[in-house]
Image (cartoon, grey):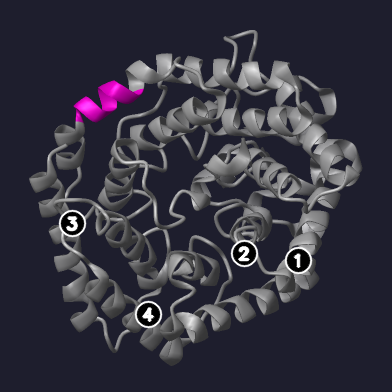
Amino acid sequence: MNTELKQQAIEKIIEKWDRKLIENRNEMDFTELTFSSGIPGVVLLLAEYGLREGFPNYSNKIETYIEYMVYKLSRYGMSTGSIYSGASGIALSILHLQEKPNYHNLFNSLNDYIVYYVEEQIKSIDIDEISPLDYDIIEGLAGILNYLLLLNDSHYDELKVKIVNYLSNLANMEDKLLKFYIKSNNQMSELENNVYPTGCLNLGLAHGLSGVGCVLCYAYRKGFGNNQTLIAIKNILNIYEDFELTDWQPFIWKDSLTKEEITTNKIIHQANFIRDAWCYGSPGISLFYLYSGLILNDTYLKDKAEKILKASMDRLYGVDTNMLCHGYTGIIQICSLFKKILGTNSFNNYIEEFIGKEDDVIKSFGDDELEFLEGLSGCLLAFNELEDSTKLSYWKQPLLLFEDFS
């Protein structure tokens, strides 16, 4: 472990944010309060490394950053309850501090807002115009549920059940999950609109079915599911079983399906781009197979989950970065989880090789690549977790890496 290099990297991140706190104090910068690229991820980074021998105690810096978030919230308010861009992400970043009196008001206010936001969101979603932003793990209800499942407070149980039932009902509709079908104008980008002009059913972890499936599995394990939840999980599984690209090679899927493919139950359009990553592709899908296998006590699913991830590691299509989201760090974190939950040694060589390249990986990020999801902060948290099992915060929760699932 190169402590000096990590300290320098953390100092670079701190310098950036110290500067932004001054420059942006009277400006509305939406990204500052996002978990994906803002202060919440930095708070978790400093909290975790503050526990490590050889690193300073960052508690004063953490307090400064939280006070800045409070100032910005009081001045500009909150526009979403999501985990990667809104209140759930901020609340998760201070969850490990919830017992400290000076954070009670902030924590409770964020949770109150989340309750309000979810109630309004469920009422306002138009099923005929559904978007990933409505249901996914990044901006949607599945991500908010993922956060709420960390709260051991019965006050939020009714809300958890409401989200579970809503997502389960979407997955239990007829016509092969077409209630999750995204019309072209409701997709995530102009590129997706062009690739899927008639819309699509997203299969990725970040914005698609596998992410929803993972959270439903976790909710069921936590006691917030019912028979309809199990049916929903099985329905989602059926999509992946039916549309695996076995004629090309096993354990691989397109990023999305068209309505024509779903209704005819066959692949019609060639895959435009395949990436083996956390956000899109087989590694993220392997998580859903793992969790559903554990929930259903199904050896086939658990074994297939491991085979999916192993095949991904051996080919690594479209992976040319070290970030968490669609880079090597994210896949290694999935490997680490499989090792812990299944007790498998299949991924030891990949993990050890990654740790051995620590210096090169850290140095691969530029000065403008310091964020959690797509930058240096997430990578540093990953190395910390691989080298030291002591964890203070819940930084892995937004990645759907549920270590308490086994």
Task: Name the residue tied to disc 3.
Answer: 10
Q: Nearer the viewer, residue 117 or 320?
A: 117
> What is the spatial separation of the Cα atoms under label 3 and label 2, in whole angstroms?
29 Å
Q: Secondary structure at mark 2?
A: loop
Residue 230 position by quadrant: top right
> What is the spatial separation of the Cα atoms under label 2 and label 4, in whole angstroms?
21 Å
Residue type, mark 4 in image = Met
Residue 316 position by quadrant: top left
Image spot of residue 346 (x, y percent): 45, 15
Query: Contact, CB < 8 Å: mark 3 with mark 2?
Result: no
Residue at 30% x, 35% y is 321
* Res. 69 mark: 4
- Magenta-drawn segment: 351-357
- From the image, give the main secondary structure of the stretch colored magenta: helix
> What is the spatial separation of the Cα atoms under label 4 and label 3, in whole angstroms?
20 Å
Asked whether residue 199 appears in the rendered view, the answer is no
Q: Secondary structure at mark 4?
A: helix
Residue at 84% x, 35% y is 176
